[in-house]
Image: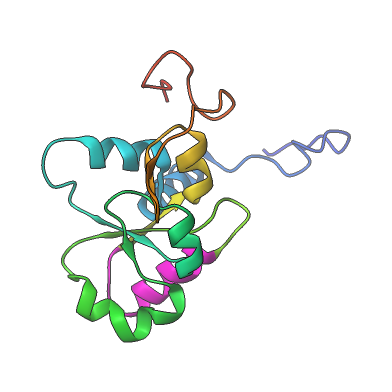
Amino acid sequence: MTTTNPANSVLRVPPASPAAAAAYFSASLAFHADVSDVASALAADGDPGFVVIDSRSTASWDQGHVPGAVHLPTALIPEQAEQLLDKSVPVVTYCWGPGCNGATRAALALAELGFQVKEMLGGFEYWVREGFAYETWEGPEQKVADPLTAPVDSDDCGC
């Protein structure tokens, strides 16, 4: 039996069943990667097993991008993706940040072409806010990690 508490906006709609929740969260992880996990995989020795795509404009790319990322603006994906990418290698897309759905549009365009794809949650904004090094048209840069987005005295947030 499902009960609701109309006075409580959290429980006004009851939580999903454990099985439905497990399916939803499992699917979410199949579609998304977070900045820390992408950075960790790229920093490890060897091939991370995926390629990172920056789907923003050239001006945005020049302002800063993930080291080693491939610059492929979303509008150019239909005509350039198959020349730049290998369909056997998963792709991780990113755009500006959580307020931008450009990475989602890029991921959709790549999936429609037959690529395996995930979206990097947080985008370039959280890459920088978490203190990871990035490249600009002037060279490499890095900012101090924002304590609201990354652990201050640890490389691991524990999640």
Q: Outermost residue toward the right?
A: 7
Q: Outermost residue toward the bottom?
A: 79
Measuring from the top left, give residue 144's x and y in whole percent: 49, 27
Q: Outermost residue toward the left?
A: 46
Measuring from the top left, give residue 94's x and y in whole percent: 44, 57
Q: Please tell me whether residue 79 is drawn above or below residue 141 in the rendered image.
A: below
| Left or right of residue 2: residue 16 | left
| Left or right of residue 37: residue 103 | right
Q: Nearer the viewer, residue 77 or 18?
A: 77
Identify the residue at image location x=23%, y=79%.
Answer: 82
Q: How many marks?
A: 0
- Main secondary structure of the magenta stretch: helix
Q: Please tell me whether residue 107 is drawn above or below residue 144 in the rendered image.
A: below
Identify the residue at image location x=29%, y=35%.
Answer: 40
The answer to whether residue 78 shows anywhere in this view is yes
Q: Where's the N terminus, which quadrant?
A: top right
Name the colour scheme: rainbow
Identify the residue at image location x=75%, y=36%.
Answer: 10
Q: Where's the C terminus, which quadrant?
A: top left
Q: Outermost residue toward the front?
A: 138
Q: Which residue range is magenta in the image?
A: 102-116
Q: Nearer the viewer, residue 137 or 28?
A: 137
| Left or right of residue 105: residue 30 | left
Picture quadrant where residue 54 is located: bottom left
Q: Would you say residue 108 sits in the magenta stretch?
A: yes
The answer to whether residue 122 shows anywhere in this view is no
Measuring from the top left, give residue 53's x and y in whole percent: 34, 61
Q: Would you say residue 15 sits in the magenta stretch?
A: no
Picture quadrant where residue 45 is located: top left
